[in-house]
Image (spheres, rainbow, N blue to C red):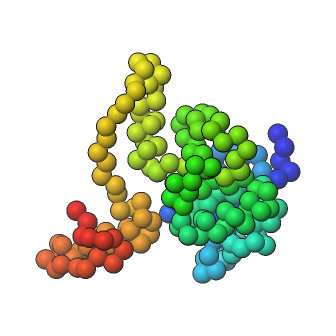
Amino acid sequence: MDRSWELAVVGATGVVGRELVGALAQSGHPSERVRLLASERSAGEELPFGDETLEVETANAETLRGARLVFLATPADVSRTLAQVAEAGRALVVDTSRAFVSDLRTPVVFPRVPGAGLGRVPDARRFRVPGPVSQTILGCLEPLRAAAGLREVHVSALICASGAGRQGVAELEQQTAGLLASRELEPTHFPHRLG
């Protein structure tokens, strides 16, 4: 296994980023070096990575230089910018945001369905993961499709506030406290009251 390459996780201090860092630490990833990157305000934080503790650095062109695989666990606008920077350095990019949801040149990679989506764009250097609802549904339905030829499914999904990251969770907490205290609060992150 070639361990002479560098992996970077951008947005490592966010909700999704922390989960990704934990999953990578448990996976036995083949990289020689792992860099945890985030915004300037998170630089200097330390995060556990297996038996090590890694310091978070500021995400920019300099800290992305040399990375061969870059995971973007960032808001869509940040992902669009940093994906270009990483691709210019010849890195493979995996984005967790919705930045490239309409880009047909960015294949969707389904973690629970090996190879799904990868053949669509043979020279792709940027990939995206589907949202959590799609991943969960596909993980449940793929065995049915394989065994019984399932061809079509109609789904209604209720999306959780945590899908909007820390701000979503904070607003849910504030709105819940307000409702329990019989106070109506104006939404700040979402377009309407939750629940």
Residues 174 and 116: in front is 116
Camera-nearest residue between 33 and 137: 137
Q: Nearer the viewer, residue 96 or 55?
A: 96
Quadrant placement of the C terminus: bottom left
Of residues 150 and 186, the one drawn nearer to the viewer in this rendering? 150
Q: Residue at x 42, y 20 (%)?
A: 149
Residue farthest to the top?
Answer: 148
Above or below — where is 40 with respect to 6? below
Measuring from the top left, give residue 24's x and y in whole percent: 64, 51
Q: Relative to 63, does residue 130 appear above or below in the rendering?
A: above
**Horizontal arrangement in the rendering, residue 32 relative to residue 15 (left or right):** right
Whether residue 19 is visible here, answered yes or no, is no
Report if residue 177 is visible in the image.
yes
Whether residue 3 sits left or right of residue 11 in the image: it is: right
Is residue 48 rendered to the left or right of residue 185?
A: right
User: What residue do we see at 21% from left, 76% from top?
Assistant: 178
Name which residue lies at 36% across and 74% down: 189
**x, y percentage for residue 74?**
56, 65
- The image shows residue 143 at horizontal and vertical percentages of 45, 26
Above or below, 90 against 85 in this view is above
Residue 117: x and y in percent read 59, 38
Q: Which image quarter: residue 58?
A: bottom right
Quadrant (top left, top right, bottom left, bottom right) of the N terminus: top right
Q: Quadrant of residue 21?
A: bottom right
Which residue is drawn at the image coordinates 29% and 76% (left, top)? 187
